[in-house]
Structures are given as C-alpha cells and as structure tokens.
Image: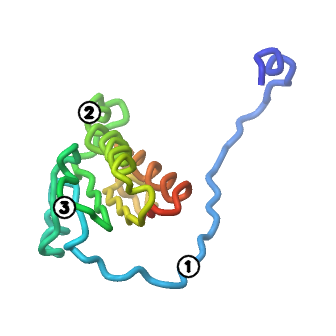
Amino acid sequence: MCSSDLAARPAVEHDVLLAPAWAPAPVPTAAPGPLDARHALLVGRGPAALAVQAALPGITCVERFDDTALEGLSPQHLLWVLPDDAPAGPADDAIVARQAEGVLQQFRALKALLGRGFGSRPLAWTVVTTQAQDTGLEDAVDATHAGALGLAGSLDRKSTRLNSS
C-alpha cells in the first residue's frame, strides 16, 4: 500500500483491540519414539541443561554451538536448552546480548546443519525455554528467547526433514 492510499483512507475514530486467536492443533496419531542419547546433541548451559544431561547419560553436550560442535557427529536429535537467566525488563539492553545465546546462535546452527546436508535427512529439533511465553498463571514473562520458538516454528512449517518441538 502506498502512502497516498493511506491518506485516502478514513482515520479510525475509536480504539481497536487485537487479540490472538488460537486454532486447535490435531493430536499426533503416533507418539515419537524414545530419545537415543547416543544420537543426540545437547546445546545449552544452566540447571535445565544439567537436568537433561543427567536424564540422558551418554548424550554429547556443548554449551555453545560453533563450527566444532558437529565434528564426528551425525545427530538425529538436537536438544537446545536456552539459558534460564533472571528475567530482564523490556528496556534492558542485556536482552540483545542474551539473544546471542538464543535465536542468533540457533540460526547459525541451522545454517551449519543445512551446509552439512542435514536438510536431506531427518533431524528432530527440540527447543526448551523458560518463561518465554505467557501461560496465564501470573508468571513473569521474559521474551528474550521467544524468537527461538518462532524460528523453531518456522522451521517446522517449512521443512519436511527438520522437525521441531
């Protein structure tokens, strides 16, 4: 729409409230199989990553995904546990720095995986966040890593081989 089109439209004379509308998702007909730690890569740090590591003995772990994370590996499942740092306020400059550990690192990992041929074979991708979405339970929301969920959702919709949860 051009700016001249906007000028020709009448102005809204009252407040408009836009609310999200959720569509029900179908329940999967088959449950995924158990996770084999020998074919999984855990990326993350902090208490949640340590809990996953304790629950899956033998899983390969890295705190940050870089060029060496895939050396000698051909994972079938990538578990990405984002840091559970103290919530930052919406005006906190630390949000951008913290996103370097989240969606920006995740995007670089996706590019590295596709560069190594993972776009042509199945790879499950699980993203774990804390307080990234409003649960309606009066919990504080820290949207720092909400973009990581958005990237995972886009990946799930656009790729038939890379599946996120």
Quarter of the rendering containing residue 95 = top left
What's the distance in space between the residues labelled 2 and 3, CA to CA? 20 Å
Q: Nearer the viewer, residue 6 or 104?
A: 104
Find numbered disc 1 in the image and state the secondary structure of the residue it sits on.
Answer: loop
Q: Nearer the viewer, residue 73 or 59?
A: 73
Coordinates of residue 140 in the picture (x, y in percent)? 35, 52
Find numbered disc 3 in the image and state the secondary structure of the residue it sits on.
Answer: helix
Q: Residue sitting at 19 percent across and 51 percent down? A: 69
Q: Earlier in the sequence, mark 3 or mark 1?
A: 1
**Can you see residue 142?**
no
Numbered label attached to residue 97: 2
Q: Residue sitting at 19 percent across and 47 percent down? A: 64
Tag 3: amino acid: Ala
Coordinates of residue 143 in the picture (x, y in percent)? 38, 45
What's the distance in space between the residues labelled 3 and 1, CA to CA? 28 Å
Crowd rating for badge 2 (residues with CA inside 10 Å; few <14, some 14–19, many 20+): few
Q: Earlier in the sequence, mark 2 or mark 1?
A: 1
Q: Is residue 22 above or below residue 82?
A: below
In contact (CB < 8 Å): disc 2 and disc 3: no
Q: Circle 3 is placed at which residue position?
A: 49
